Image (cartoon, helix red, strand yellow):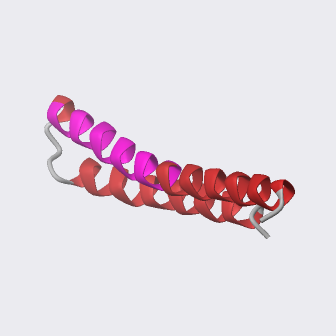
Amino acid sequence: MPEEEKEEINRKSGLAYAAAFSLFAAVVGGLIVGWLLDRWLGTSPWLLVAGLVLGSAAGLYEFFRASSKLS
């Protein structure tokens, strides 16, 4: 396999891992922020659910944005 092909595979692998990690981090971050706000404001479980939804939306946006760089 030529060196250029290996570099391209490594680049695409790195972008794929970054996309997956950003999706995971956004969801977990939204959950943590929602949970902390629920504890502080006593609104359990509503802000946790809102954090999950917003974190998922942000994570999916970043995932698809990063995935578009792969093609």
Dividing the picture into quarters, in which one does residue 37 lie?
A: top left
Front position in the image: 63 or 61? 63
With respect to residue 60, does 38 lie above or below? above
Side of 9 relative to 2 (left or right): left
Outermost residue, top direction?
A: 40
- Residue 23 percent location from the top left of the image: 48, 55
Q: Quarter of the image containing the N terminus?
A: bottom right
Q: Main secondary structure of the magenta part?
A: helix
Dividing the picture into quarters, in which one does residue 25 lie?
A: top left
Front position in the image: 57 or 2? 2
- Residue shown at the point (39%, 60%) measured from the top left: 53
- Residue 22 percent location from the top left of the image: 52, 49
- Residue 20 percent location from the top left of the image: 50, 57
- Residue shown at the point (51%, 61%) measured from the top left: 57
> Does 70 lie within the magenta span?
no
Side of 53 relative to 71 (left or right): left
With respect to residue 1, does 33 lie above or below? above
The magenta stretch is 22-39
Side of 31 relative to 40 (left or right): right
- Residue shown at the point (51%, 56%) measured from the top left: 59
Front position in the image: 33 or 28? 28
> Does 29 lie within the magenta span?
yes
Total labels drawn: 0
Q: Quarter of the image containing the C terminus?
A: bottom right
- Residue shown at the point (22%, 41%) measured from the top left: 35
Outermost residue, bottom direction?
A: 71
- Residue 18 percent location from the top left of the image: 57, 49
